[in-house]
Image (tube, grey):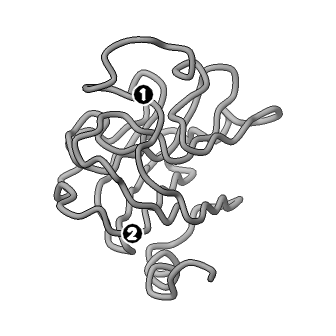
Amino acid sequence: MAWTSAANLAQGGGGVASIENFGTFDGISFGEGTAGQWTATSDFFARTPTGNGGAAETSTGRVLVAVTWDDQGTIRLFRDGVPYGTRVLGTSPAFFFAGFAQLLFGLRDSNEAFASGDVTTFDAFFAGTIDEVRLYGRALTPAEIADIAAAGPVP
């Protein structure tokens, strides 16, 4: 989960925080797949809920974006403690990150750090601020995420 704000509401693919293991990654990005929306992103969209159903951002204000993955393979995305998007895979993605893994902040995945191209439509670097990122060793419940959203970030 991350307390963050997008500075460029037209950005596509800006990574807020990701965990990756040799090219396999999962994370939080902005404007990837659906313009103006927060996304639970993954390599080749393998575990990415597309068409979240969540409303596009209209403000550059700070929000809490949280993603959970559970043992049944359900990926849930929350914005400010409220459900925002869901994808059911039927298998747990947890095995991808056994052993070595790295955390990235402000970047979708390390392969994109060296990519070139038209950054007006896709930029793996996040255009905005990241105030706080938290990584938990288990999927938080919707109630826990709502409580964290209500409490706000650590001052």
* Residue 62 image label: 2
> Is residue 1 in sight in this rendering?
no
> Which residue is nearer to you in this view: 29 or 42?
29
Residue visible at 77% across and 36% down? 98
**Alpha carbon of mark 1 to alpha carbon of mark 2: how far?**
28 Å
* Residue 23 image label: none
> Which residue is nearer to you in this view: 96 or 115?
115
Residue visible at 82% across and 34% down? 99
Q: Residue furthest right?
A: 99
Q: Is residue 78 left or right of residue 34?
A: right
Residue 44 point in image, percent of width and height: 42, 21
Q: How packed is label 1: few (under 14 Cα within 10 Å), some, or many (20 or more)? A: few
Tell me the residue that label 1 is attached to.
Answer: 46
- Identify the amino acid type marked 1: Ala
- Identify the amino acid type marked 2: Arg
- Hey, which quadrant is residue 82 in on the image? bottom left
Residue visible at 44% across and 74% down? 142
Which mark is first along the chain, 2 or 1?
Answer: 1
Residue 93 point in image, percent of width and height: 57, 38
Tell me the element at label 2: loop
> Which residue is nearer to you in this view: 82 or 139?
82
> Is residue 138 in sight in this rendering?
yes
Residue 112 sits above or below residue 96 on the image: above
Q: Is residue 42 left or right of residue 95?
A: left
Residue visible at 30% across and 34% down? 12
Kindly report which numbered mark, 1 or 2, lies closer to the viewer in this rendering: 2
Q: How packed is label 2: few (under 14 Cα within 10 Å), some, or many (20 or more)? A: some
Instruction: Work out which quarter of the rendered image holds the C terminus and state it.
Output: bottom right
